[in-house]
Image (tube, grey):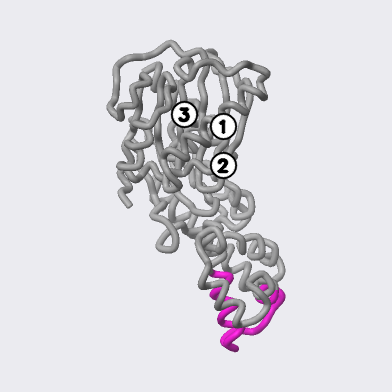
């Protein structure tokens, strides 16, 4: 994976991946947050007032750049419908996109080149738009915990840096998939007699099919998403089963390591984002727990900030 993300945009509907100095006068702005499981968009007017929201299927670039646009278009139509507005010509809409897969610069360029006619397009990583939304475009850091994980910091001088996000299974520390893999590892030890049985291991065994043969079959089909489905069991049993608690405490330590790498001086605000933010927050080291703040908005709003910043630059 190329972790050096490139900011890509078009300021017209020509479909080129090159930066353009033209700044079209669009009447509406769309912020799109897209990943491997779904797409969420927010619709705003020129003043930045939120008008409506929509959702659709995946728009992570690994699923296809044309499919990403299909999902974004469908979600955009839903947002206009939710706002009781007729959808205008695409040329009258500027769209900012925070998408999984933008690290692959070839995918990102292809995506921007396939612009179906929006008046302006900006494509960035979903980590960056998560940061923009969480901190309202101001300097600071975020650590996003979901199926995967990533951290990003925006420094006061405008420089950006990313930590983690190398992908499962080699990275994604403290993520749902990371928690799930450790749950299965514990189950293997219990089935072998290398660890004592407990209600946590029994619940994982039930999830994976109920016996050793079923676990082998489950493992043969396991991917990041399937491992992440086990994360709720780790969270559920952590208060009462020591091994589950140890996994959550290890996750908290991994978040602290990311936070230290992002902001060594502990001088910037830091937000914990994503579906696992709340469960993992309880297991953070005390000094970090005291610094963590709630995100002010989501990645779709961050994508809205992205396109607004681009057009007003």
- Report the mark closest to the observer, 3 or 2: 2
- Report the mark closest to the observer, 3 or 1: 1
Q: Residue at x 69, y 73 (%)?
A: 206
Which of 47/261 is in front?
47
Reading the image, the residue beneath label 2 is 57
Query: How many neighbours does mark 2 have within 10 angstroms: few (below 14), some (14-19), or many (20 or more)?
Result: some
**Main secondary structure along the magenta-highlighted residues:** helix
222 left or right of 20 in image: right
Q: Residue at x 53, y 43 (%)?
A: 58
Which of 97/4 is in front?
97
Which of 66/307 is in front?
66
Calculate the distance from the C-alpha at mark 2 to the C-alpha at mark 1: 9 Å
Calculate the distance from the C-alpha at mark 3 to the C-alpha at mark 1: 27 Å
Q: Could you tell which of marks 3 and 1 lies nearer the N-terminus?
A: 1
Determine the image quadrant of residue 74. top right
Badge 1 element: helix
Contact? badges 3 and 1 (CB < 8 Å): no
Contact? badges 2 and 1 (CB < 8 Å): yes
The reply to whether residue 101 is in sight is yes
Badge 3 element: loop
Instruction: Name above or below for residue 19 compared with residue 184.
Output: above
In the rendered image, residue 84 lying in the magenta stretch gets the answer: no
Reading the image, the residue beneath label 3 is 137
In the rendered image, residue 194 lying in the magenta stretch gets the answer: yes
Percent coordinates x, y for residue 38 in the rendering = 56, 43
Q: Could you tell which of marks 2 and 1 lies nearer the N-terminus?
A: 2
138 left or right of 9 in image: right
Badge 2 element: loop
Magenta span of residues: 182-202
Reading the image, the residue beneath label 1 is 74
Query: How many neighbours does mark 3 have within 10 angstroms: few (below 14), some (14-19), or many (20 or more)?
Result: some
Percent coordinates x, y for residue 293 in the rendering = 57, 40
């Amino acid at each position: 994976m190329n972790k050096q993300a490139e900011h890509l945009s078009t300021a017209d509907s020509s479909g080129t991946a090159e930066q353009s100095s033209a700044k079209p006068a669009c009447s509406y702005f769309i912020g799109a947050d897209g990943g491997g499981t779904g797409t969420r968009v927010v619709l705003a007017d020129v003043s930045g007032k939120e008008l409506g929201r929509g959702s659709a299927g995946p728009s992570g670039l690994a699923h296809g750049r044309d499919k990403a646009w299909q999902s974004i278009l469908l979600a955009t139509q839903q947002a206009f419908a939710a706002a009781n507005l007729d959808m205008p010509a695409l040329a009258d809409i500027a769209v900012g996109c925070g998408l999984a897969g933008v690290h692959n610069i070839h995918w990102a360029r292809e995506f921007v080149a396939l612009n179906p006619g929006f008046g302006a397009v900006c494509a960035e990583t979903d980590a960056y738009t998560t940061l923009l939304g969480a901190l309202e475009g101001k300097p600071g850091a975020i650590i996003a915990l979901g199926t995967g994980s990533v951290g990003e910091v925006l420094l006061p001088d405008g420089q950006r840096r990313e930590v983690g996000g190398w992908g499962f299974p080699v990275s994604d520390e403290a993520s749902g998939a990371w928690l799930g893999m450790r749950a299965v590892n514990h189950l293997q030890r219990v089935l072998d007699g290398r660890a004592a049985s407990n209600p946590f291991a029994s619940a994982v065994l039930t999830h994976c099919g109920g016996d050793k043969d079923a676990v082998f079959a489950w493992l043969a089909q396991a991917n990041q998403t399937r491992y992440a489905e086990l994360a709720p069991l780790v969270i559920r049993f952590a208060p009462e089963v020591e091994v589950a608690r140890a996994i959550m405490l290890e996750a908290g330590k991994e978040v602290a390591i990311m936070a230290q790498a992002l902001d060594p001086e502990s001088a910037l605000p830091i937000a914990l984002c994503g579906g696992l933010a709340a469960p993992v927050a309880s297991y953070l080291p005390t000094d970090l727990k005291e610094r963590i703040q709630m995100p002010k908005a989501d990645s779709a709003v961050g994508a809205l900030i992205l396109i607004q910043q681009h057009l007003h630059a």
